Amino acid sequence: MEPIGGIDCANGHPLVLHGHGFGGSRSLEGFDAYRQAGFTVISIDQRGFGESTGTVRVMDPEFEGRDLIQILDWAEANLDYLRVREEPDLPSELNPNLVVGAIGGSYGGGFQLLLHGQDPRQRMDAMVPDITWHDLRYSLNPGNVIKTGWDLLLVAGGETGSVGNGNSGLDPIIREILAQGAATNRFPQEGLDFFYYHSPAYRCSGTEIEPPALSGLVAAQIDPPAYDVPPVAYAPVDVLLTQGMKDTLFNFNEAWRNFECLKALGGDVRLMTHQSGHILPLEAPDEAQPATYLDPTAGLLEIPGFQGPAGTFACGEVSISQATLDFLRHKLADEALPGYFDGSDTAACMSTDSGDAVKIAYDQFPAPAQAGGLLAGPFTVNRTVSTATPVAVGYEAVATAAVTPTALVLGQAGADGAVLAGIGSAELTVADLLGRTACPDGLPEGSPGCDPIIFIGLGKRSEDDSAWTLIDDQIKPLRGLKQAAAVELVGVAEQLAAGDQLALLVYGFHPQYPASWSRDALVPFVNVSGDVQLPVVAGNLIESRLP
């Protein structure tokens, strides 16, 4: 789509690429604000969706990655009014360099990071990926527990969005990975390697993948050339990362790990959160299609069908849609940033509710180290917890269909309230009724008798309320017997009123994981104990006066 107001051949027009959500297709409307700003917009049908052909490989460098480079090459060769400029950090053979930005949410965020990492001409200047992933192993299989609620919806949405438009649907390799996971309650290792290779984490970590043994359908279909070489790190790039705090598919931890990776490269990287994102419904919809970017001047992210936003698409009073446009105008067209961006280069904007937010300096942001370990630093509050009675897991929990959690109270907000924001952690022991915290000698991890699954999250309730609310709907599975195991909790941002009580909630079954509860009938109950590290960035958390 060409700029509104005509083509400026003297100065040229920056190119903005747009990507749709999983199961969607390119948008032909909704970009007037970008065109009025002088941008040329290309909205892309990703491989296997819309009018694009082939099977869906989920941002495979060898397939979707090559397709994206061809689109950029075509634009540069055929649209002679696109802007180019000298980039002093690039070698002479790459100058003058095309001026390119990118927008999109979910799958439309994933394409941006893939293209930036793949493009040999380093044409990406600025990106605004929203609600996208860092590591698909974590997204789809956190704690080695399949996220069946979302996995089932993504399969339905992917197949509907692809086959429904005359395409071939999910690639057989993905169908096989999912089928083996459904049959065994565990993804095959080759499948996890496949997801890792399709993730920003692959380039960020620098960790190579061991070539799979050529046995079985999964292994036989995984042999990309990149498995034989170390991953190449991203080049520095300017990025505005945005993320929904209530997103239960790609949660805040994914955005923070992407931020850490990209910030360390030296670009201008910023982080804002909002109250929207992938919101899991109680019932499977007729069609599952995650977020698409439409009118960038709207106050909300427009999400089709069941994905009604949980809250505003804003961080406090700052519209994420407007911030997306303004960031690209600054980076691609050299326009000044509006005043609401002041301080965003040094502090994250954390949405605590619709219309409310707190800012936290990046260099003090409360999160465990990426290599693992526990939360530490100036905002950390430590609490010790232990279950008074055993927690029912697996068949015992599913038989009652109960989702009432066991609450391990952590304290309550003081007279001035408190703000919980960041990524907490825990060091937990999970024991069976015999006190065992590991598989018996000679038995591998995951064997019957040592394979319980619990789900943990932070919850709150007011002084006059008996029911607990799972903060930001965020839950983390924990699989197996454990002895003082370090656990990274899911990031949250929540304001606690004076007297609000905070607890670690423990579930033996949770509807976000409807088909991935424990099948280990030999461990029907577990006891949980340990220490929890909380990111309290304002106010204080006192010992609870409530029962």
Image: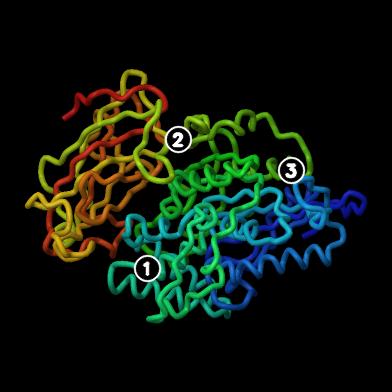
In this rendering, the label closer to the viewer, 1 or 2: 1
**Which of pointers 3 and 1 lies earlier in the amino acid sequence?**
1
Up-down relation of residue 501 to residue 204 (above or below): above
Which image quadrant: the C terminus?
Answer: top left
The local secondary structure at tag 1 comes to helix
* x, y percent for residue 91: 78, 52
Farthest residue, direction right: 10
Label 2 and label 3: CA atoms lie apart by 27 Å
Amino acid at dot 1? Gln
Q: Residues within 10 Å of mark 1 (few under 14, many from 20)?
A: few
* x, y percent for residue 330: 73, 40
Q: Are marks 1 and 2 in contact (CB under 8 Å)?
A: no
Q: Residues within 10 Å of mark 2 (few under 14, many from 20)?
A: many
Q: Which residue is mark 3?
A: 329
Q: Residue at x 57, y 54 (%)?
A: 105
The local secondary structure at tag 3 comes to helix
Up-down relation of residue 257 to residue 155 (above or below): above
Checking the image for residue 352, the label placed there is 2
Q: Are marks 2 and 3 in contact (CB under 8 Å)?
A: no
In this rendering, the label closer to the viewer, 2 or 3: 3
